[in-house]
Amino acid sequence: MNVIGVDLGGTKILARSIDITNGKANKRVKSPTPKDGPEAVLDEIAEVVAEVDPDRECSLVGVGVPGLVGDDGVVAQCPNIDGWDRDVNVKEGLESRLERSVVVANDVNCGAVAEHRFGAGAGTPDMLAVFVGTGVGGGLILGNELREGARGLAGEIGHVTVTPGGRRCGCGGRGHLENYAGRAGIEAEARRRAASGEPNLLVSLANTGKIKSRHIEKALAEGDKVAEELLAEAVEALAIGIGNLATALDLDRVVLGGGVVDKLGQPFVDRIVASPSFGGFGSSTCDLRLAERLDDAGVLGAAIIAAER
């Protein structure tokens, strides 16, 4: 059975035709995410889907969205999409445009399902997927099923507190994990230090643009002191958060992915495992593995969730 999977991100929309019986991803279409509001985003998703499946062979579309998704397909709090300033019924809007059935899910949950079925989480009934990118997201699988919780927040490890009273998070809280391990949090602190008289290669490389994962990798390779200090904070924050959650839920496995992890690779994961700050009973409580699906995890998971719902 083929289902169209769509991964909506802050910079791009990716769509593929997915054979959900074996996880094989076929035709691939990518387009920049519009910056002038949700209606333009929905229009572009419809265009991308039509390009992937011009003959309308797939009657079902799964869409992963970086926001809070209600059971009715309404998406709220979508801060990574420019101009998304209100609740939007993505399911209804896309079904009217596509004249196909649409299922909408959180993008991180889509990634978790993809890794559990056809990636680094295959074979374990209980796992947490942690994606370290602009922020830090998490998806939770228990008893071979995606668990979303009462408010859709199950597994959202990025907003657990790792430093009481620490840096202010974009959500308004303080000391949350993503403020120390997410790319945006690392950038904010690097720029704060540069402004206070502590120049660093992270800011120099990015100049006025965003500090990206490749800048972090290069600054570390060149021995930049601030980059190394910020990476050490990221390792400590992830070790605390992952270890505590793995202990509390008695997880077999934690899968780590996202732009920052993909770029820094196994040595980054090894540092988390070896950290003396590893929460709970330590790294012996679970097996930490690099994500395997990478670019197609979002589209694959969106297609699987759509088919099963």
Image (spheres, rainbow, N blue to C red):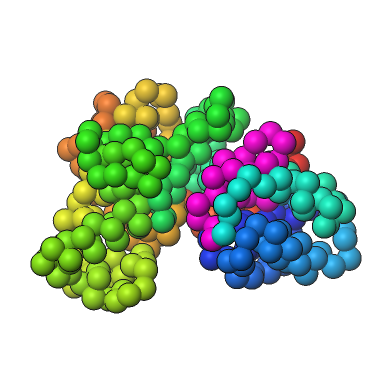
Q: Does residue 248 appear anywhere in the picture?
A: yes
Q: What stretch is highlighted in magenta?
A: 63-82
Which quadrant does the C terminus fall into?
Answer: top right
74 part of magenta stretch: yes
Q: Does residue 66 appear anywhere in the picture?
A: no
The number of numbered discs placed on residues in the rendered structure image is 0
Nearest the camera: 41 or 162?
41
Q: Up-down: is 209 above or below 151?
A: below
Which residue: 71% across, 45% down?
Answer: 89
Quarter occupied by residue 199: bottom left
Residue 46's spot in the image, x, y percent? 76, 62
251 part of magenta stretch: no
Q: Up-down: is 199 above or below 147?
A: below
Residue 40's spot in the image, x, y percent? 68, 64
Which residue: 50% across, 52% down?
Answer: 79
Residue 286's spot in the image, x, y percent? 36, 33
Magenta part, dominant SS: loop
Which residue: 26% across, 31% down?
Answer: 279
